[in-house]
Image: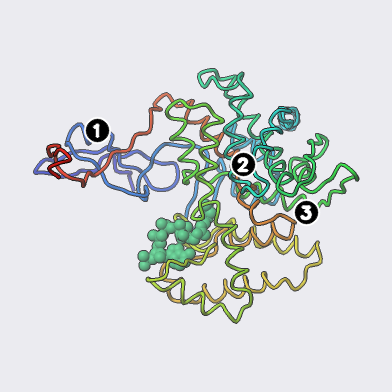
Amino acid sequence: MTKKETATLTYNGNTYDLNVLNATMGPDVLDIRKLYADANVFTYDPGFTATASTTSKITYIDGGNGVLLYRGYPIEQLAEKGDFLETSYLLINGELPTHQQRKEFEKTITNHTMLHEQIFSFYKGFRRDAHPMAIMCGVVGALSAFYHDSIDINDEKQRKLATIRLIAKMPSIAAAAYKYSVGQPFMYPQNELSFAGNFLRMCFGVPTEEYKSNPILTRAMDRIFILHADHEQNASTSTVRLAGSSGANPFACIAAGIASLWGPAHGGANEAALAMLEEIGTPDRIPEYIERAKDKNDPFRLMGFGHRVYKNFDPRATLMQKTAHEVLGELGIKDDPLMETARELEQVALNDPYFIEKKLYPNIDFYSGITLRALGFPTSMFTVLFAVARTVGWVAQWEEMMEDPKQKIGRPRQLYTGPVTRDYVSASNR
Ligand code: CMC
């Protein structure tokens, strides 16, 4: 079948030709850029359910078939055969690294893992019980006050340096947020460890004894990072792009992304899913919660279920479930009641007509909470770990936007429904 080149829109008795832009995979796009100028009409799409806000070569999702590709590579292959640093290189540069490129990339990243020493005093301004995502927003935003030599967005070298710094420092920032919350000394990075191994040590090691890495748990952490690394134009990535479109510096843009990720409909869902499983407690209470999720008058939703794009299954959830089993197996957790409740809830929901009809399947957050909890993280850290991984996607997408000659400030329009023009009435006459 030959591809359509134009679509026709009839409005107010006039006909307008809209160019069709072809995708390499997935739906083509109607080009409406000139529509307002030609027809004096806007398009309406709250939540951007059918609007492409950009072109991108980074990540592809086929929600109907549960496909997720990073630069064309299936997530399953990257998660099984690759590692997070290689995945980061791929997302940023477009190709998998050669052996030499990989070595150089690893060296560059490890050279930037330390934080400016003064950043640690920044932490002390926070309350000990501050949510670590609040600390992340503040500290990452503050990086622009520490690294003045990487905030000129028009200098490609500075942009690259900011990208490296963000990927390298994010685990150190996240681990310090955790250490601060438990009152333990901050741990400095150990550069001979892997990205994930270093992160686990900075979280769970103490200066008084040698930290012993567990390869299975380190691998699980690494896989969790790979699975969360990018997800095309989701809310936080779009936030990063929108912030960046005004020319804001990269650290400020990533802080904006972290703020957006925090919400329970997005990255905060892993924390919310685990809280929900804990609240349900035992499988016998599942029917009550299923009924609540289906009740239109009850705002409760099954956290960890449903996705804007995946309408069949979330391939990340399948890999995450496997990782959860590996971690629980390694730690000898045989009868985890939460895992039992999760499995049962998944089965009940997957067979319930409401969830079938609305195509609501477990998403990645359903199983990531169980895994992270078993690894020793408190629920408040779950979204922080998501942010550590997603930073790679954010910087890759930000850099792609900065290199795009067609890039302009993001500025959505609106359908105004407020009062029409009226005259000011002085207070005594109101
Ligand atoms: N439990 C019960 N009903 C649900 C759920 C749920 N988890 N999710 C959607 N629905 C219903 C919703 O009430 C609506 O019903 P109706 O058409 O009768 O009004 C219908 O399904 C469509 O929902 P929607 O909110 O219009 O769908 P959306 O595409 O805007 O929302 C979502 C996607 C992920 C925000 C939503 O499914 C949700 O809130 N899920 C729970 C939170 C969650 O797990 N989020 C993590 C997403 S994956 C991680 C990430 O990539 O950020």
Name the spot of residue 252 as percent of width and height, x first.
53, 31
Q: Is residue 222 above or below residue 272?
A: above
| Amino acid type of the residue that numbered disc 1 sits on in the rendered structure | Lys
Q: In the figure, residue 152 lies in which quadrant?
A: top right
Three-letter code, disc 3: Leu
Mark earlier in primary sequence (2, 1): 1
Distance, label 2 to label 1, CA atoms, is: 43 Å
Distance between the Cα atoms at labels 2 and 3?
26 Å
Q: Amino acid at mark 2?
A: Ile
Nearer the observer: mark 2 or 1; the answer is 2
User: For this rendering, which residue is in front, 416 or 195?
Assistant: 416
Q: How is the image coloured?
A: rainbow
**Residue 359 seen from this side:** no
Q: Residues within 10 Å of mark 1 (few under 14, many from 20)?
A: few
Quarter occupied by residue 36: top left
Q: Is residue 309 left or right of residue 155?
A: left
Q: Residue at x 10, y 43 (%)?
A: 12
Q: Is residue 166 above or below residue 383?
A: above
The residue where tag 3 is placed is 217
Checking the image for residue 34, the label placed there is 1
Mark 3 and mark 1 residues within 8 Å of each other at the beta carbon: no
- Residue depicted at x 31% and y 48%: 45
Residue beneath label 2, please?
A: 135
Q: Quadrant of ligand 1?
A: bottom left
Relative horizontal placement of residue 181, taking residue 31 as reference (left or right): right
